[in-house]
Each structure stands twice: as structure tokens, then as C-alpha cells.
């Protein structure tokens, strides 16, 4: 299942035509796909731009994986998939089981990723993505395009999708791309983005100077009046 997916990835960037140049490029693309690790392949997929590549040494350290076996089905198979380990037990698996293992590998990698990005090396990788605005910008007008970071509302998988955190207004938003909106928020966790700004103090922006003031015919609308009107409407028969 992994190799099939890699072939699709390689073919996806392949242009048409019968020229020798196109054939050579195709051969190179396929060669690159075959040489790529599962981790690099996974992180290169469209929609996975928020992920950094977790070091193999980190994944191989059992201490870093403590407790994940109870959360991930087909754990051993999933771990072997991530580490590109082929074992005799892979033979005889049904297509349905292979698909389940692929899904388990994605879940396992996401949970490992959440732990990796709070380490110095992992955070450094996320810093580069942050500087290059890979995570997008805050949609709030008065934040003036402030870069954001991915954040989870829960550390438990399949609870909330990924959101983005703006350090300027200190609020969270849905990612602009629907592909990123489908990522599990647990793959980034609740701690990372806040630890990030505790670590890189120079990245902390100044609070926004302005805020929007609602007006009717030029007159400010006071929150107490709006709240009273809402309460009255809610209590109306």
C-alpha cells in the first residue's frame, strides 16, 4: 500500500509528452519516490505542509513512544511502516488490513509528531516553517497579516481538528485551506504553540493597537445595550 501510494506521488508531478527529456524526468521522479522514506513521502503530500519530518532516531527511541501502543491499532505494523521496515509478517495481509495499517501509521506519526515538535530540534523545524509563513496568516484585519502557528484544542486524537493560533490577538481560527482543516489537532497538541513563544521571545509580536468599533449612523453601539436587546429577544414569547 505504501509503495502504491509512492508511485501515485511520483506520477502526480509527471508531465505529458513523448520527448526523451520527459522520459528522463519521469525516471528520475520514480527513482526519487523509491528512495524517499515514508516520513518524507508523508510530509510531502498536499495537505501535510504543517508537518515537519521527525528524525528517525527520535522514532526509534522507545521512551519517546511511551503509551502510544494503547492508542494506535496495528501498532507494530504502523511503526514498521513509518520506519520503512519490511518483515515477513507483512505477507498475507488483506487489502483491507493494509489500508487499516496505513491509517494507523498516519495516526501514529501524528502523535509522535506532537511530541517531537516540543523538543528543541522539532521546534527549530517549526520555526523555519513559521518564518516562511507555511502556516498562513491571521484573518483578523487588525492583526495585519500576523503569521500563525498550528494548535490543537485537545491532546486526544479524533476530538478536534487543527486550528491556527495568532500570537498577536491570542485567538484561534480555522486554517484557510480545507485540506489543513481536516488534520487532527492532536497531531500538534495544546502545548506546542505556547511553548514556542516562551522559547522564542523575539517572535512574540506586540498586541494589536486597534480594534473594530460597531457604529450606527456614526454613533458607537455599547455592549450593554446590545446584550440587553439580545436578552430581551431571547425572553420574548
Image (cartoon, helix red, strand yellow):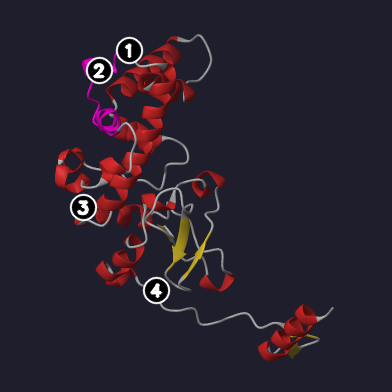
Q: Secondary structure at mark 4?
A: loop
Residue placed under numbered mark 2 in the picture = 89
Pointer 3 with pointer 1, Cβ within 8 A: no
Task: Give the residue drawn at x 36%, y 52%.
Answer: 129
Task: Give the residue drawn at x 55%, y 53%.
Answer: 176
Residue 60 falls within the magenta-colored stretch: no
Pointer 4 with pointer 1, Cβ within 8 A: no
Where residue 183 appears, as percent x and y from the top left, is 46, 46
Q: Which numbered disc flags the more N-terminal residue, 3 or 1?
A: 1
Foreground: disc 4 or disc 1: 1
Image height check: is 200 above or below 156? below
Where residue 151 appears, as percent x and y from the top left, is 41, 59
Q: How many marks?
A: 4
Residue placed under numbered mark 1 in the picture = 92
Q: Secondary structure at mark 3?
A: helix
Q: Secondary structure at mark 1?
A: loop
Amino acid at each position: 500500500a505504501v509503495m502504491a501510494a509512492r508511485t501515485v506521488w511520483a506520477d502526480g508531478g509527471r508531465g505529458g509528452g513523448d520527448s526523451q527529456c520527459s522520459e528522463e524526468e519521469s525516471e528520475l521522479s520514480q527513482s526519487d519516490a523509491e528512495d524517499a522514506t515514508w516520513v518524507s513521502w508523508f510530509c510531502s503530500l498536499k495537505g501535510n505542509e504543517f508537518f515537519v519530518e521527525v528524525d528517525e532516531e527520535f522514532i526509534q527511541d522507545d521512551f519517546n513512544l511511551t503509551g502510544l501502543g494503547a492508542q494506535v491499532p496495528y501498532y507494530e505494523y504502523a511503526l514498521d511502516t513509518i520506519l520503512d521496515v519490511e518483515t515477513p509478517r507483512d505477507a498475507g495481509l488483506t487489502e483491507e488490513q493494509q489500508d487499516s495499517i496505513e491509517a494507523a501509521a498516519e495516526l501514529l506519526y501524528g502523535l509522535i509528531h506532537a511530541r517531537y515538535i516540543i523538543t528543541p530540534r522539532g521546534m527549530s523545524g517549526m520555526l523555519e516553517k513559521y518564518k516562511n509563513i507555511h502556516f498562513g496568516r491571521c484573518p483578523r484585519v487588525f492583526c495585519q497579516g500576523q503569521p500563525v502557528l498550528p494548535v490543537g484544542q485537545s491532546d486526544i486524537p479524533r476530538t478536534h481538528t487543527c486550528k491556527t493560533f495568532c500570537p498577536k490577538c491570542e485567538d484561534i481560527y480555522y486554517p484557510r485551506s480545507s485540506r489543513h482543516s481536516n488534520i487532527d489537532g492532536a497531531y500538534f497538541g495544546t502545548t506546542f504553540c505556547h511553548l514556542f513563544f516562551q522559547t522564542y521571545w523575539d517572535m512574540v509580536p506586540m498586541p494589536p493597537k486597534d480594534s473594530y468599533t460597531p457604529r450606527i449612523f456614526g454613533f458607537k453601539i455599547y455592549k450593554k445595550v446590545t446584550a440587553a436587546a439580545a436578552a430581551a429577544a431571547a425572553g420574548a414569547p
